[in-house]
Image: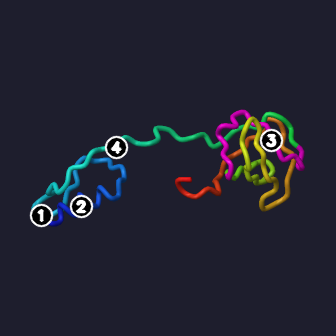
Amino acid sequence: MKRRGFLKGLLAVLGAPVVANEIVELAPEGPTPIAQVECEPWTYDELTPSVDLATEYATATDTTIAVQNPQLFLAGDYVHVPRTGENLLVQQSSKRLHVVRGIGGPAHDIVDEEPLWIIGNTRSNNA
């Protein structure tokens, strides 16, 4: 009985979503229910796209880049240009991306309809 109270308290403290509505203890005589929990719906039902296209030519010295879907980008995103190998750091995203060019290597010109891959970010978890 003491174990059941501990597990219920632990689940309440963790507050994590679960996929089953019953926690069971595996015993030689078979599974024994030890706690009932409510299932929470998944937070996300689809992945956010991680590739977009530049919509106009940008020289290697330009720090703003026009893209088709600026709402996909957040400040702190790392963006990779596969054709050139250049990496960018997004500082601000509005109608155009404001970026730091040439992270880890030289900056290159970006052509119209160049794919831009979001490869990661500098934000802390849950930020």
User: Disc 1 vs disc 3: which is toward the camera?
Assistant: 1
- Residue 42 point in image, percent of width and height: 40, 42
The residue that label 3 is drawn on is 65
- Residue 64 point in image, percent of width and height: 82, 43
In the picture, the disc for residue 1 is 1
The residue that label 4 is drawn on is 40
Q: Report the side of 41 relative to 108 (left or right).
A: left
Instruction: Say which quadrant the N terminus sits in.
Output: bottom left
- Residue 76 point in image, percent of width and height: 68, 52
Marks 1 and 2, how far apart in space?
10 Å
Tell me the kind of residue under disc 3.
Ile
Color scheme of the displayed model: rainbow
> In the rendered structure, which disc, 2 or 4, sits on the residue that comes first in sequence?
2
Q: Nearer the viewer, residue 23 or 93?
A: 93
Residue found 57% across the figure and 40% down from its top: 48
Tell me the kind of residue under disc 4.
Glu
Marks 3 and 4, how far apart in space?
40 Å
Is 73 contained in the magenta span? yes
The residue that label 2 is drawn on is 7
Marks 2 and 4, how far apart in space?
18 Å
Residue found 69% across the figure and 34% down from its top: 69
Marks 1 and 3, how far apart in space?
62 Å
- The segment highlighted magenta reads 59-76
> In the rendered structure, which disc, 1 or 3, sits on the residue that comes first in sequence?
1
Tell me the kind of residue under disc 1.
Met
Marks 3 and 2, how far apart in space?
52 Å
Tell me the kind of residue under disc 2.
Leu
> In the rendered structure, which disc, 3 or 2, sits on the residue that comes first in sequence?
2
